Amino acid sequence: MITIAVANQKGGEGKTTTSLNLAMGLARRNYKTLLIDMDPQANSTGIFVNPDTLDKDLAQLFQSATKLSDIIVPAYNENLWLAPSSMRLAEMETISVNSVEAPYVLRDALQEVSHFDFAIIDCPPSLSIFTVNSLVASNYVLIPLQAEKFSMDGIMGLQQTISSIKKRINPELEILGALITQLKPQTLLTKTILPVLSKYFKIFEHTISDGVAIGESHLAKKSVFDYNRTSRQSQEYEGFLEEVLRELKK
């Protein structure tokens, strides 16, 4: 199983959108995929189920009260399953952080669901114990970010965390690349910042442009492919997905 953490400590960079469309795009290609919602805001979860109606979610996993296989639920099609979240997960942060085993909860839990081809982890917009868990459990990190100064400022903390986890806990962790989202290609800011970002990370050739199809697909609770497959953003995410698969075959 290939595990990819979609991470950025700054909010509004496109983590959930990218996690959803990557997971659903893989499922559409007949890859058995597990989408793990590690964000207590539960936005990924809410696309498929109402978090308030669930008896079990990732909070119980961090309480050591259940196994991962007992909380995952079917989503989208027969190839996609969801490990759901809820606001209850936020209550686990202060409890979990005091445990020696805290960074390893997700890594250990994934061992029993290794029959999936992919696990895609939607990380919270912080460097919390849940993001640390995601990085410890992953083979790769995918970083969605905008071509803006504040996005660059926030990325340094994430880079340091990745380096520390790679050095101390998970030497196999690699940065898959950065995906530029909400792109406004002709602005001076974009033309200035993209070359700077490329010094820190591999930048995917495909970028996701600014547009309404993404937000509308969230309201419709669909992938951008299913909501409007002729939209620019749908075609961009299709191209990005193909690029990810090529990178993983190298």
Image: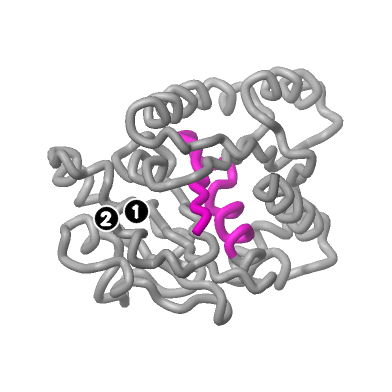
The residue that disc 1 covers is 40
Binning the other alpha carbons within 10 Å of mark 1 as few (below 14), some (14 to 19) or many (20 upward) gives many
Q: Which of 87 and 234 is in front in this view?
A: 234
The quarter of the image holding the C terminus is top right
Which residue is located at x 64 percent, y 27 percent? 201
User: What residue is rendered at 71% in x and 55% in y?
Assistant: 241
Q: Mark 2 points at which residue?
A: 89
Say left or right for 224 vs 90.
Answer: right
First in sequence, mark 2 or 1: give its number: 1
In the figure, 242 relative to 156: above or below?
A: below
Q: Where is residue 236 in the image (x, y as percent from the top left)?
A: 78, 52
Q: Do the residues labelled 2 and 1 touch (CB within 8 Å)?
A: yes
- Marks 2/1: CA–CA distance: 5 Å
Residue 181 pos. (x, y %): 68, 42
Left or right? Give the position of 154 relative to 39. right
Give the residue at x 45% y 46%.
138
- Residue 160 falls in image quadrant: top left
Q: What residue type is labelled 2?
A: Leu
- Amino acid carrying label 1: it is Pro
Number of numbered markers: 2
Image coordinates of residue 45 in percent, x first then y, are 44, 65
Question: Dot 1 lies on which element?
Answer: loop
Q: Within the image, what quadrant is residue 96 found in?
A: top left
Q: In this view, does 29 lie above or below 106?
A: below
Colouring: one colour
Say whether residue 7 is magenta: yes
The residue sitting at the bottom extreme is 78
- Span highlighted in magenta in the image: 1-23
Q: Residue at x 38, y 66 (%)?
A: 84
